[in-house]
Image (spheres, rainbow, N blue to C red):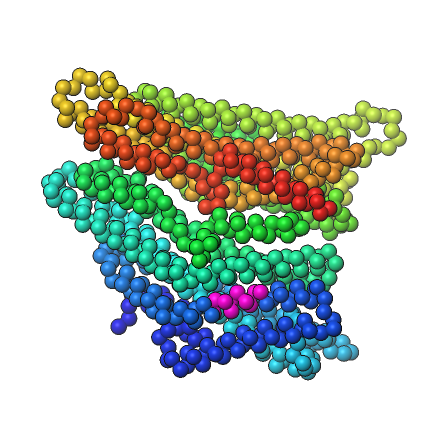
């Protein structure tokens, strides 16, 4: 009998079986496979460490040996860990089968099918990448043989291994035998990594599916309409369904605990080894680059470093997903209409909220919790070594080529945002053909601005001043290009945000609520207007200064026998005569500046305006709570039951708008998270480089470059403050819901209302935040963190100059 999950996990079983780690294989064959694999690992380590016991010993030799051995040691640890917990793999498999067997709904089965399919596809992709890398690594060492065939010399080219080994034999004569041993060692290590990691990945995805099913059961239970069901019967229905939801959530946590208990310690050792390996590889890479040694070694070490960082990123990403999935259960409970459930069920819901308010985390032997915060901790260990390396005239034409559907009262507050987005092809209601043309054009302009600066290294002699100048200009424009293209990928989600804003306006009940949302929208419009005017006035000033410096002064200062030398504001190599085509090149620079900065203000002001809208919704929630408990709310009503019903309805409407505010924030995060996840680290890096460049220029007489760099630094600080201030606004307004609820006269309300308020306060204790990639929360504290990080990076670079 084939179980439904077998077709998804068959490849994982085959990979584990190939290296003796599948517990259902024949015991004798399995023992032979394990012993043979351990002998291969030991021999692989031995032939490399023997190289250290030679007269030619040096620090570079030690680093080269350690770099590859630390990498192989990671998978040796994984192999030993898996072989020691083989019986627990049976337990995990039995849990998976039991989970599939208890599903009662087609939607629940589809959820597990979806996550199992993702696991299968991930396994195939990882296996292809790893085996392709192993084959490429092996074949590269046969390049001399290929060159002897294609371009023969008088003598055969010497063959070279890509890593140091000592076989006590002539490597040229026994090259093929040595390569077979190396290929077997690499194949075993790669198969261990693929088999073990993909098995744990599909197991983790199964746990994510269980958390998702728990959320689905909670949502389905609390969406039942009880108005037509007798109270006694509704209680039984709710009780059965909430029991089923709690059961699946408990099973998900137990399954995750089993993964954590059996593999947490091995991941701790692997993480420490990976950090050591990355440190050694980075240090060796720095030495090679400074001594200008062979490029093949640089490429090899770069591959090591990239692989290790990908390993750390994926491991911490999976840990973060455990946190996110359990948090999703909490958000699902809070965002459903739990207030429609019977009173006894609301008590159960309160227990669930308390249980899930603290997100579930996996940890490595209780010492390290994989997450994006954990990833930042890993990177902090490597920070010191890492620092070594490191158009308004178009509106009429555009309006004629676009179609808009702005008819809502809210649209008047977003007119400037719409026009800015129209200019750069990011308005979701824009004509598809014209939008594609604009996106292609602006992408090419921004991409070419980065490429033409980097090609300067081809024609000019390398120097630190040249490197800093190119990085100071190219990194910001690289971030603009990435921001623009990432935003283009989320165009459909932007349409959803626009429609959601209109819907929120249409749901407001009275003039006071409309005044609140209008006030916050007006604040967003005012900031958008001021920012747009400031940016375009700065662009105008830049154009005037460049025209004056390169054209006008030639006519004013007539005493000079020759024209003053003209130069572009940034280093760029377009492979044409710059003097001959200077006017054309300067026009291109102006176009690049306009496109880049228009992209920035269009995206940033839109996010700011939507943040203000969310803050307005939080304030409307406060208003509804105050109105519901206001003494004059039900003054003319004599019936106590009717009065209590009106107050309850007021609290329910407040909870509803609070939930909508949180949902809007989550929709905004989904649309903008990758934009900021990519651009904020680039901004920190760019700020550090510009600070370092400013420290070098401030003692020279290059006044123009000094002023430009100072403006760049101030612009970076302004951008970081702007982004973090928006995050702080969301935190403050969401926390105000808790304070306002507590400060009203809740103690005079009926008991049923007090229980509703208790749930409201329980939910609002957990502040709503704009989490970027699960790693960083924008706030004033976050601004201080990013500023401190930039200054510390600058000090490290400055100290090693």
Depth check: give the residue in front, 329 or 465: 329
Residue at 47% x, 43% y: name it.
772
- Side of 30 relative to 566 (left or right): left
Residue 152 is one of the magenta-drawn residues: no
Q: Vertical placement of 75 versus 478: above or below?
A: below
Residue 73 is one of the magenta-drawn residues: yes
The quadrant of the picture occupied by the N terminus is: bottom left
Region in magenta: 70-79
Residue at 37% x, 68% y: name it.
89
Image coordinates for residue 21, horizontal then vertical, percent: 42, 73
Depth check: give the residue in front, 478 or 679: 679
Image coordinates for residue 108, horizontal then vertical, percent: 27, 55
- Side of 230 relative to 69 (left or right): left
The answer to which image quadrant residue 284 occupies is bottom right
Q: Vertical placement of 19 versus 233: above or below?
A: below
Image coordinates for residue 413, horizontal then vertical, percent: 43, 26
Prevalent SS, magenta region: helix
Residue at 18% x, 28% y: name it.
645
Labels in figure, total: 0
Residue at 50% x, 26% y: name it.
527
- Side of 213 relative to 124 (left or right): left
Is there any visible trace of residue 602 in the rendered image?
no
The answer to which image quadrant residue 546 occupies is top right
């Amino acid at each position: 009998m084939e179980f439904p999950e077998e077709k998804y996990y068959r490849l994982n079983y085959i990979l584990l079986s190939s290296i003796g780690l599948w517990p259902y294989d024949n015991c004798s064959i399995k023992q032979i496979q394990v012993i043979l694999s351990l002998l291969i690992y030991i021999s692989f380590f031995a032939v490399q460490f023997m190289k250290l016991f030679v007269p030619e010993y040096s620090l570079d030799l030690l680093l080269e040996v350690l770099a590859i051995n630390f990498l192989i040691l990671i998978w040796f640890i994984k192999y030993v860990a898996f072989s020691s917990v083989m019986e627990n793999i049976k337990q995990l498999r039995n849990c998976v089968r039991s989970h599939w067997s208890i599903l009662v709904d087609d939607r629940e089965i589809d959820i597990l099918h979806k996550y199992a399919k993702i696991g299968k596809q991930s396994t195939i992709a990882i296996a292809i990448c790893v085996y392709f890398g192993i084959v490429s690594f092996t074949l590269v060492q046969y390049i001399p043989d290929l060159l002897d065939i294609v371009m023969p010399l008088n003598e055969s080219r010497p063959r070279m291994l890509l890593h140091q080994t000592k076989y006590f034999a002539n490597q040229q004569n026994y090259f093929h035998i040595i390569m077979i041993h190396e290929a077997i060692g690499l194949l075993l290590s790669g198969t261990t990594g693929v088999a073990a990691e993909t098995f744990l990945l599909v197991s983790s995805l199964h746990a994510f599916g269980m958390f998702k099913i728990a959320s689905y059961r909670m949502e389905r239970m609390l969406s039942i309409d009880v108005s037509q069901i007798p109270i006694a019967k509704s209680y039984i229905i709710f009780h059965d369904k909430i029991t089923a939801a709690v059961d699946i959530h408990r099973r998900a946590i137990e399954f995750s605990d089993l993964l954590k208990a059996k593999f947490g310690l091995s991941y701790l050792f692997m993480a420490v080894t990976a950090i050591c390996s990355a440190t050694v590889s980075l240090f060796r890479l720095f030495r090679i680059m400074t001594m200008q040694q062979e490029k093949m070694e640089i490429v090899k070490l770069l591959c090591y470093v990239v692989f290790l960082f990908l390993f750390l990123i994926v491991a911490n990403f999976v840990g973060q997903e455990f946190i996110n999935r359990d948090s999703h259960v909490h958000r699902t409970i809070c965002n459903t209409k739990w207030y429609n459930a019977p009173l006894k069920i609301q008590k159960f819901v309160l227990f669930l909220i308390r249980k899930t308010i603290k997100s579930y985390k996996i940890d490595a032997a209780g010492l390290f919790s994989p997450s994006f915060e954990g990833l930042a901790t890993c990177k902090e260990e490597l920070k010191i070594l890492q620092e070594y390396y490191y158009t308004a005239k178009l509106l009429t034409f555009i309006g004629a080529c676009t179609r808009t559907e702005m008819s809502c009262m809210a649209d008047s507050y977003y007119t400037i945002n719409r026009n800015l987005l129209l200019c750069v092809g990011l308005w979701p209601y824009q004509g598809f053909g014209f939008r594609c043309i604009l996106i292609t054009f602006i992408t090419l302009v921004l991409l070419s601005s980065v490429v033409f600066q980097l090609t300067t290294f081809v024609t000019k002699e390398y120097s630190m001043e040249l490197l800093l100048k190119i990085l100071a200009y190219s990194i910001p424009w690289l971030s603009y290009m990435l921001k623009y293209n990432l935003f283009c990928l989320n165009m459909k989600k932007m349409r959803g945000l626009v429609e959601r804003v209109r819907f929120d306006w249409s749901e407001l009940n009275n003039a006071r609520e409309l005044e609140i949302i209008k006030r916050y929208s007006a604040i967003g419009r005012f900031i958008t207007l001021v920012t747009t005017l400031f940016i375009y006035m700065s662009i105008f000033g830049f154009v005037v200064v460049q025209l004056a410096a390169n054209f006008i002064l030639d006519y004013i200062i007539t005493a000079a026998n020759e024209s003053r030398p003209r130069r572009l504001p940034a280093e760029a190599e377009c492979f044409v005569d710059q003097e001959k085509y200077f006017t054309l090149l300067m026009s291109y620079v102006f176009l690049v500046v306009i496109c880049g900065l228009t992209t920035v203000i269009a995206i940033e002001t839109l996010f700011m305006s939507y943040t203000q809208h969310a803050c307005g919704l939080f304030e409307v929630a406060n208003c509804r709570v105050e109105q519901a408990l206001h003494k004059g709310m039900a003054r003319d009503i004599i019936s106590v039951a009717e009065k209590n019903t009106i107050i309850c309805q007021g609290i329910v409407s407040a909870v509803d708008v609070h939930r909508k505010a949180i949902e809007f924030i989550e929709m905004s995060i989904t649309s903008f998270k990758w934009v900021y996840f990519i651009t904020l680290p680039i901004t920190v890096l760019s700020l550090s480089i510009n600070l370092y460049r400013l420290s070098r220029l401030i003692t020279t007489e290059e006044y123009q470059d000094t002023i430009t760099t100072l403006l760049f630094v101030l612009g970076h600080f302004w951008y970081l403050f702007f982004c973090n201030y928006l995050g702080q606004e969301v935190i403050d307004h969401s926390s105000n819901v808790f304070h306002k609820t507590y400060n009203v006269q809740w103690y005079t309300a009926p008991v049923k209302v007090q229980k509703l308020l208790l749930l409201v306060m329980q939910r609002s204790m957990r502040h709503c935040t704009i989490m970027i990639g699960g790693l960083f929360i924008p706030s004033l504290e976050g601004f201080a963190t990013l500023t401190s990080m930039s200054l510390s990076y600058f000090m490290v670079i400055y100290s090693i100059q």
